[in-house]
């Protein structure tokens, strides 16, 4: 509910923390005075529930959702539930449908005008709401509250997403790119038509839609981090360089500093001149084929040297942040509902043996030793010694989820 200061100023808080002006004083009074709504100014508040609303251009239908973020718990996904308000006066015998679609956009929305579609539906489910075709469904508490306010013009709906759908991910556009970003998005859309799947796209005045997100959060339990080691031998040296690297834990949160423990035993006649540690994002795009793109999201170089027959045992720190890669085109970021700050895309948690289409994201930490040549050729020759560690990068689970 609004606090006293917000009521006085006629402003409400949006989910992103920004404020917007309330277009109707009624929305600052009790919930009984706020519905039915006369304008879109979401989210609005219905008792204890925050409700998002979108009305069609002709005003004949309105879509209500209780939230726009739906959690994938790996074994199950939150039910997408809402209510459609239908004014049948101007429908002229047409029907009202609602669908939930998961789609992959792989081209700019601006290019659709030339007759090519750069959007592929990965999964879609439709249901007819008006005229009603079945019995009365079991309502969620949010739907019950909405139905009391909307009255006889309200038609509840719910969708159960399967667990083999990807999460909402956007591919970061370049500095000069325009239009909607490529990536995986989810959309709830209500529309007026003669049949569920019309040959032509319904006119915008006959539709209303809200974008939603499917998201995953880090598991509560955190296991010890991975460890990797390598032993590499060089020409003109009868003994190797031994490199071992490890992480403190398996899961790190966005913005958290990652501590990498490194052990080096240099038994060669060469010198380890520099240590480079990087975090790389691997984006696996599974659509018509499977392609993996690797981009460094953070790289740090450390000047520690290890002389011939020397050792080093030290911890290094690195912090991968999207803010340091805002101009990297094609980087995967968490799907966003509005322009604004977001995170690097979270690691896609395993769904077992099920094949997922869309965008799958993973990370790795790479530790690289730059070894300068020794012996007769001195510094003219060199080589790298590298180990890689898997990294899980996610957001913590909010208390209310």
Image: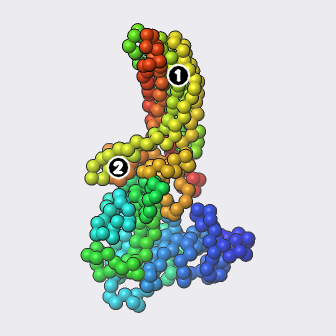
- At a point 30% along the width and 47% down the height, the residue shown is 290
Label 2 CA crowd tier, 10 Å (few <14, some 14–19, many 20+): some
Against 351, is 260 above or below?
above
Looking at the rendering, in which quadrant would you find the C terminus?
Answer: bottom right
Front residue (pair 247, 79):
247
**Is residue 132 in view?**
no
Q: Residue 202 carries which label?
A: none
Query: Looking at the image, do the residues carrying marks 1 and 2 touch, with CB atoms under 8 Å apart?
Result: no
- At a point 40% along the width and 42% down the height, the residue shown is 294
Circle 2 residue:
285
Q: Where is residue 63 in the image (x, y as percent from the top left)?
A: 46, 75
Label 1 CA crowd tier, 10 Å (few <14, some 14–19, many 20+): some
- At a point 45% along the width and 17% down the height, the residue shown is 373
Circle 1 residue:
273
Q: Where is residue 134 in the image (x, y as percent from the top left)?
A: 34, 76
**Is residue 284 in view?**
yes
Q: Please tell me whether mark 2 sits on a helix, a strand or a loop.
A: strand
Q: Earlier in the sequence, mark 1 or mark 2?
A: 1
Q: Position of residue 190 (x, y in %)?
A: 40, 75
Within the image, what quadrant is residue 127 found in? bottom left
Q: Is residue 365 left or right of residue 93?
A: right
Against 307, is 191 above or below?
below
Front residue (pair 75, 66):
66
């Amino acid at each position: 509910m609004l606090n006293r200061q917000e009521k006085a100023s006629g402003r409400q808080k949006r989910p992103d923390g920004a404020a917007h002006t309330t277009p109707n004083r009624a929305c600052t009074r009790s919930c009984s005075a706020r519905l039915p709504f006369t304008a879109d100014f979401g989210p609005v508040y219905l008792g204890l529930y925050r409700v998002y609303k979108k009305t069609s251009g002709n005003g004949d239908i309105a879509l209500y959702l209780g939230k726009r973020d739906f959690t994938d718990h790996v074994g199950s996904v939150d039910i997408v539930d809402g209510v459609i308000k239908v004014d049948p006066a101007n429908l002229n015998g047409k029907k009202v449908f609602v669908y939930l679609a998961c789609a992959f956009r792989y081209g700019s929305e601006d290019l659709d005008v030339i007759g090519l579609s750069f959007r592929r539906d990965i999964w879609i489910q439709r249901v007819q709401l008006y005229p009603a075709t079945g019995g009365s469904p079991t309502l969620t508490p949010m739907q019950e509250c909405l139905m009391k306010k909307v009255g006889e013009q309200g038609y509840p709906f719910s969708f159960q997403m399967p667990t083999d759908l990807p999460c909402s991910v956007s591919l970061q556009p370049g500095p000069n790119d325009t239009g909607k970003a490529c990536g995986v998005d989810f959309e709830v859309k209500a529309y007026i038509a003669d049949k569920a799947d019309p040959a032509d796209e319904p006119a915008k005045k006959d539709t209303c839609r809200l974008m939603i997100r499917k998201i995953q959060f880090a598991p509560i339990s955190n296991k010890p981090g991975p460890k990797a080691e390598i032993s590499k031998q060089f020409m003109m040296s009868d003994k190797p360089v031994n490199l071992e690297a490890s992480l403190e834990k398996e899961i790190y949160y966005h913005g958290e500093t990652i501590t990498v423990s490194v052990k080096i035993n240099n038994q060669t006649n060469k010198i380890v001149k520099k240590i480079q540690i990087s975090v790389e994002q691997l984006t696996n795009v599974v659509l018509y084929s499977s392609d993996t793109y690797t981009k460094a999201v953070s790289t740090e170089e450390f000047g520690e040297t290890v002389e011939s027959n020397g050792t080093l045992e030290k911890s290094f720190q690195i912090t991968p942040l999207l803010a340091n890669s805002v101009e990297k085109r094609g980087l995967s970021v968490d799907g966003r509902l509005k322009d604004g700050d977001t995170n690097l895309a979270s690691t896609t948690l395993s769904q077992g043996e099920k094949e997922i289409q869309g965008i799958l994201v993973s990370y790795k930490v790479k530790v690289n030793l730059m070894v300068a040549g020794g012996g007769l050729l001195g510094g003219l020759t060199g080589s790298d010694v590298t180990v890689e560690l898997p990294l899980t990068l996610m957001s913590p689970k909010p208390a209310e989820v």
